[in-house]
Structures are given as structure tokens and as C-alpha cells.
Image (spheres, rainbow, N blue to C red):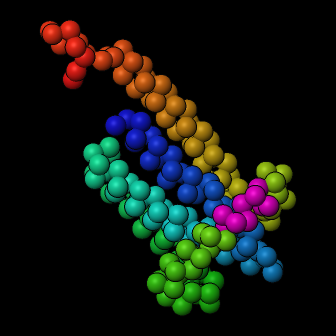
Amino acid sequence: MRKANFRFWLLVVLAFVLTQPGSIAFANWDMPYGFYKDLSVWMGCAAAGLVLVLVYGLYEWRNGKLSPLNPILAGGIIILTALTGYHAELALGGKMHPNFLAFLIGGFIGLVLSLMLLPASLLYALTGGLYYPYDRPLAVAWVVMIIIAIVLLVAYLKAKKEEAKESEGRGPSVSSSGQGGP
């Protein structure tokens, strides 16, 4: 179960990490609108990605691999992410998405676009060419999330290795009749 928890939370963090460069790229494709536009697009894309991660988490919970607390916390993160993005959109006057439902639908379209633009924008993000000066907080948040993702990946691989060691140590059990069995 520990391995599944690390994998789930790694996917939650990756929903933010993988959508950021592409979402910033297409938020500024015609002209830079400022910090709030970039934040709004990133949070919309991340919220859409988190919905997919939540569906996966519910599947894993139904199969007994995750505790119910994990999908509940992820649902809370989705709500906070979507509200943060929508409020950033409202700070711009709400011109792109007149209501919350339109913002959520736009988030799924943005998710596809941000993932398509990820390979092209990643080089610019790593060299700092993607960001305008007002995007520094977003760049710092992205780097922090990459570090968190690396820590979660290491923890996941360690838990996977320990789990494999435990199952290897148990091996097939031998019954009193000398035949293997559970």
C-alpha cells in the first residue's frame, strides 16, 4: 500500500509539473497578458490533469491499494487549484471564461494543448527563456514541484524495492505434504 501511495502522490505533483511549461507557452503565444493569465492557464490545466489522477486514485482505492483519504485529499487539491485559477481569471476581468464551468472545460482543452507543447517549451523553461520577469514566482513554484517529484520518485522506488525484497523473502510456502501452496 505504501508504494501505491507514493505513486499516487507522484502523479498529483506531476499534474502540476508537466502542465506548467506548455500552459505558460500557450498563455503567452500571441502576447503576454501578465502573471494572472499565466497562473490562470496553468491552474486550469493542472486541475484538469488532477481530475484524471483522481479517477485513477478512485480506481486504486476501489481495488484496495489506496486508503480513502488519498482521493479525498486529491479532491480538495483539485478544488483549491480550480478556484485559484478561476480567481486569477477573474482578476483579468473574466474575459476568457465567463463562468466556472467554462473555465473547467477550457482547462481540459488547455491540458491537451499544454501536454502537446511540453516538448517544445521544456527547453525554453529550463533555460529561463519561457518566462517573463513577472513569471518568476511561477518558475520558482515549478522548480520546487520538480524537487518534490524527485523526492517522491525516490521514495516510490525505495518502497518498490522493499516490497520486492519482502515478497522475495517470503517465497512460496511449503505445506506439510511437501507441496507448495498458499
Q: Where does the image place residue 50, in percent across and percent down from the top left?
A: 48, 62
Q: Give the percent coordinates (x, y) of residue 139.
A: 71, 56
Screen quadrant of the C terminus: top left
Q: Horizontal placement of 114 versus 3: left or right?
A: right
- Quadrant the N terminus occupies: top left
| Image x and y of residue 110, in percent | 62, 73
Q: Which residues are magenta?
A: 114-122
Tell me what residue is drawn at x 52 percent, y 80 percent: 105
Residue at 73% across / 73% down in the picture?
Answer: 26
Is residue 18 among what the camera can see? yes
What residue is drawn where x is 60% and y is 39%? Answer: 150
Q: Nearer the viewer, residue 182 or 169?
A: 182
- The rendered magenta stretch, by its main secondary structure, is classed as helix
**Foreground pick, 98 / 118:** 118
Inspect this view and state whether residue 69 appears: no
Using the image, determine if residue 135 lies above or below residue 3.
Answer: below
Given the current orientation, which residue lies at the most extreme left position?
A: 176
